[in-house]
Amino acid sequence: MDYLIQILTIALSTVFLTSAIAKLIDFKGAVEAGGEFGIPKAAAPLSMAFLIGVEFAVSFCLLISPVHFGAALAAVLLLLLFSIATARLVIQGRSPECRCFGQLSSEPVGKSSLIRNGVFLVLAVAVALLAGSATPIGGDGSQPVFLILFALVGLLIASVLIALELRGRLDGMEDRLKGVEKYTTLLEMQESGDEPTGGLPIGTFVGDISIENSAHEPFAIGSLTNEKLALLMIFVGPDCLPCVSLAEHIPKWAEVLKDTVEIALISTADEETNIEKFGSEIAEYLYLQHGSEVSDPLKARWTPTALLVGPDGRIASKPAAGDTAITTLITSLVDTESIEPPLFVGEELGTLSDRFGQTIPEFELERLGGARFRNSDLLKKPTLVVFWSLTCQYCTEMLTEMLTWRRDSPELGLAIIADGDRRKLEETGLGGSLILDDNYKVSETFGMYGTPSAVIVDENGVVVSETAQGANDINLLSRGVFNSKESE
């Protein structure tokens, strides 16, 4: 019996010692918790300091033979008060964080808190009842040893709690640093035109960018589309938390869209890792990239991001970044009556592409050199129509690129609509690709109002791209003519 009472007493003392040290280390959290338990805000710091002192005293006095019975009664009283306060919050339906053990127990108040307090209360009652029927701790002259052990245990508990506190702070700093890094990356991407909602111009041909299925068989992305099916690429990653909940909807979306859209879930890592992360249901939709060799050229560098490719292999949506944007894109796809090219799904393209899907009007202009150029000349093959000017610095920086198009692919469609001094235009070397449009009157019918800008006109005379502005987007859009013809 002596050993039992001593073990129970030491256990109860350790509980109160841990509670006191934990509250002291996380004093701010303990004060906030006290306010949640009904202590007036102004009195909370002093009240919590008093409670910590009482807990230290109870813990210490439980090991002092003359006063250990009184300390056990005090422990019973304190635990009764804790239990009543906790029960009141549970009955009221409130669940503030319980900081009874500082960082060790920052869980919401609930039934588990009542059960824990009940166990401690039974322990305290047992110590109080048995205190008079057994030799107390130190009653045999060993009390100094127990007090030394008490000090050592206190030091150990304090060390552990301080380590946990420091770890929590370091984790918080790491999270903040990750946030700063992510924000910095966002700023860099925005400055370079690679923000999440930016992307390839509508109408850009995806070409022969290669991905692998789960069996590591390579496919050109364009081969996953056909005249009846568009392709919805959803970029995810095993380390992306929002991607997990999103992946749960893939089979349902695939079933709803099966007659019009093929879904490709494009991820990194290997098949086993992705199946473990997202579930076996996504296996038939899973395609892999080794790094970012697919997402980078498609400007889908965030996860999750969805991008639609039309049956003709051309980009048909802006990147939908995030689960909400992806769900909105899916809803728009369900409501889309036809996926026949030219296809665009999403918000209105606006003034930058106000000719998308429209047939170009009849016109007749003069080529540099004297030959006539008519709208019917655009009905032979897909043509990149560029609005260009000698007086525009960004335009002149594109000259080398345009000369490369003309030199390497003379049989492909390139029409450069320009105004300016004919002699200087002749010196560019662009020859018959230059179409003279005085005052740019015809250019406006293509939806182009600034230089440099460009659209793709297909063999039916329909504008099948948004208006790309700037050298970078025009170079990307040029895939829709040169790459598409080369891949035939």
Image (spheres, rainbow, N blue to C red):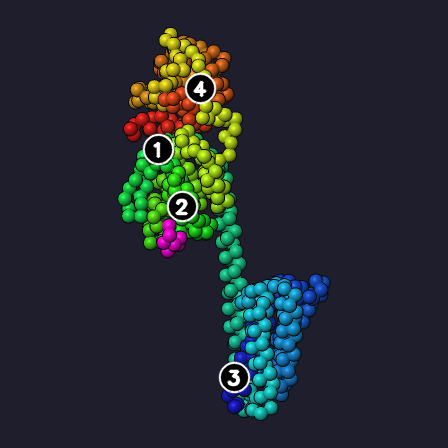
Numbered disc 1: secondary structure: loop
Measuring from the top left, give residue 452's x and y in whole percent. 45, 22
Q: Range of the magenta residues? A: 276-282
Q: Can residue 297 be seen at all in this image of the molecule?
A: no
Q: Which residue is found at the position 51% from the left and 47% from the top?
A: 180
Q: Which of the numbered marks, if any, corresponds to residue 255?
A: 2
Magenta residues, dominant SS class: helix
Q: Nearer the viewer, mark 2 or mark 3?
A: 2
Dot 1 or dot 4, earlier in sequence: 1
Residue 183 in the figure: left or right of residue 211: right
Q: Which residue is mark 4?
A: 360
Measuring from the top left, give residue 340's x and y in whole percent. 40, 31
Measuring from the top left, give residue 203's x and y in whole percent. 41, 29
Numbered disc 2: secondary structure: helix
Q: Nearer the viewer, mark 1 or mark 4?
A: 1
Rendered view: 348 above or below 110: above
Dot 2 or dot 3, earlier in sequence: 3
Q: Report crowding for label 1: few under 14, some 14 to 19, many 20 or more residues within 10 A (C-alpha).
A: few
Q: Amino acid at mark 4?
A: Ile
Q: Amino acid at mark 2?
A: Glu
Q: Nearer the viewer, residue 14 or 251?
A: 251
Residue 278 in the figure: left or right of residue 144: left
Q: Nearer the viewer, mark 4 or mark 3?
A: 4
Dot 1 or dot 2, earlier in sequence: 1
Instruction: Place residue 227 in its image quadrant.
Output: top left
Instruction: Place residue 202 in its image quadrant.
Output: top left
Q: Which residue is mark 3?
A: 7
Q: Which residue is mark 1?
A: 227
Q: What separation in Å lies between label 2 and label 4 (alpha carbons)?
A: 38 Å
Q: Which residue is found at the position 32% from the left and 21% from the top?
A: 412
Q: Nearer the viewer, residue 286 or 368?
A: 286
Rendered view: 92 above or below 184: below
